[in-house]
Amino acid sequence: MDFTNHHYAVGGRGLSAVHAGSRLFARHIAKFIPGKPTIIVQSMSGAGGIVAANYTFGGVAKPDGLSILHFPSSTIMNAFLLKERVKYDLRKVPILWVMSDSWVTITNPKMSKLKTAKDILESSSQLAIGGTGATSLRTLRPKLAMVLLGVDHRWVTGYRGSSGLMAAMDRGELDLSEQSMASYKTLIQPREKDGTAAILFQTGLLQRDGSFERARRISNIPTLADLLPKGKKTGAVWEAWKAASAPQAFQSVVGLPPGVSSERVAILRKAFKSVTEDPAFRADFKKTMGIPADAIVGKKAASVVDSGLKQLFNEFREGVEYLRGLPKRK
């Protein structure tokens, strides 16, 4: 089966990291697809990824295997937090590739006087917690963390992405914000070297038994679950934390429009498996993203997303409802 043209759409929050990853795929994957098609990367940002997902998964893009969406976990959470605006059902989306990513809460020690997670608990001043859009997980999670830790805080949203949040901490406007490990190499690491950034805790990766596993590359950094006493790990707020953290198992995902033939899905899954194992791609990915191209591909990737969706639809309903109402809470 020959793929003569190939359209690679990119969308969602965290667009810079997703866009960089998409361009990496575009440079390398064609040689693994029959016909060696030209790959066109198109940015489709807007409404926190809803525009791109509604287009690709909502019946606009043809189910011919020639359109692919590379999206972050916000595309999945939008289906729960902004479901009135979503026109797709992720349970019907053929998944090709999945990468996990533990996010980190950081501070500027020179401005906040915080150096470790313990310092948050001992702070006598109100902490300024920063975010982007009010329904973004990177905005909701730090607020949830402060609620669970019982720390006095104020919530400041509306910053533009990772760079905007980092600049606000540089200026001393914010005490804490959340960042992706995909931005570690470019935004966090240089500041760690000059003492203007410190990682306090990480989300970790939620396991089926309800525990949180630390990301291997930052295994020295505690998860929020490590910091909380057992008595805090119950109730709606804790369920909300689990619901907000579950998507980190599929932080970066590649999917197809519903209805693509099983034959074409199989061909593209094979292509993504091949490119992920390709030494040239892996070297380019590590150089650009600062992390290994360790991902789950094919049916295993689909299983990861399916498992996470079942948790969000069934197990974490109370937490999802708490998350939906959080932007309105003081």
Image (cartoon, rainbow, N blue to C red):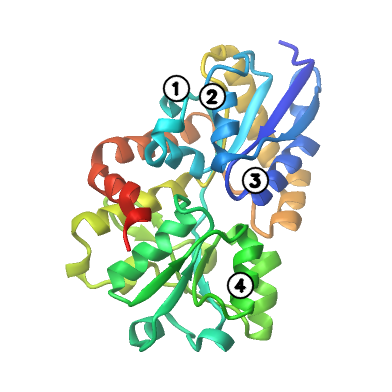
Query: For the residue carrying disc 3, how many other residues have a C-alpha within 10 Å: few (<14), some (14-19), or many (20+)?
Result: many
Q: Secondary structure at mark 1?
A: helix
Q: Nearer the viewer, mark 4 or mark 3?
A: 4
Closer to the N terminus: mark 3 or mark 1? 3
- Taking depth in this image into account, of 212 and 23 the one nearest to the observer is 23
Q: Is residue 309 left or right of residue 239?
A: right
Q: Residue at x 61, y 72 (%)?
A: 168
Measured in 3D between alpha carbons, the distance from the residue under mark 2 to the one under mark 1, in whole angstroms, is: 9 Å
Query: For the residue carrying disc 1, how many other residues have a C-alpha within 10 Å: few (<14), some (14-19), or many (20+)?
Result: few
Q: Secondary structure at mark 3?
A: helix
Measured in 3D between alpha carbons, the distance from the residue under mark 2 to the one under mark 3, in whole angstroms, is: 17 Å
Query: Looking at the image, do the residues carrying marks 2 and 1 touch, with CB atoms under 8 Å apart?
Result: yes
Query: For the residue carrying disc 2, how many other residues have a C-alpha within 10 Å: few (<14), some (14-19), or many (20+)?
Result: many
Q: Secondary structure at mark 2?
A: helix
Q: Residue at x 42, y 38 (%)?
A: 82
Q: Which mark is residue 18?
A: 3
Q: Which mark is residue 92?
A: 1
Residue picked out by circle 2: 57
The three-letter code of the residue at mark 1 reads Lys
Measured in 3D between alpha carbons, the distance from the residue under mark 1 to the one under mark 4, in whole angstroms, is: 40 Å
Closer to the N terminus: mark 2 or mark 4? 2
Residue picked out by circle 4: 168
Q: Secondary structure at mark 4?
A: helix
Measured in 3D between alpha carbons, the distance from the residue under mark 4 to the one under mark 3, in whole angstroms, is: 23 Å
Q: Position of residue 244 (x, y in %)?
A: 38, 52
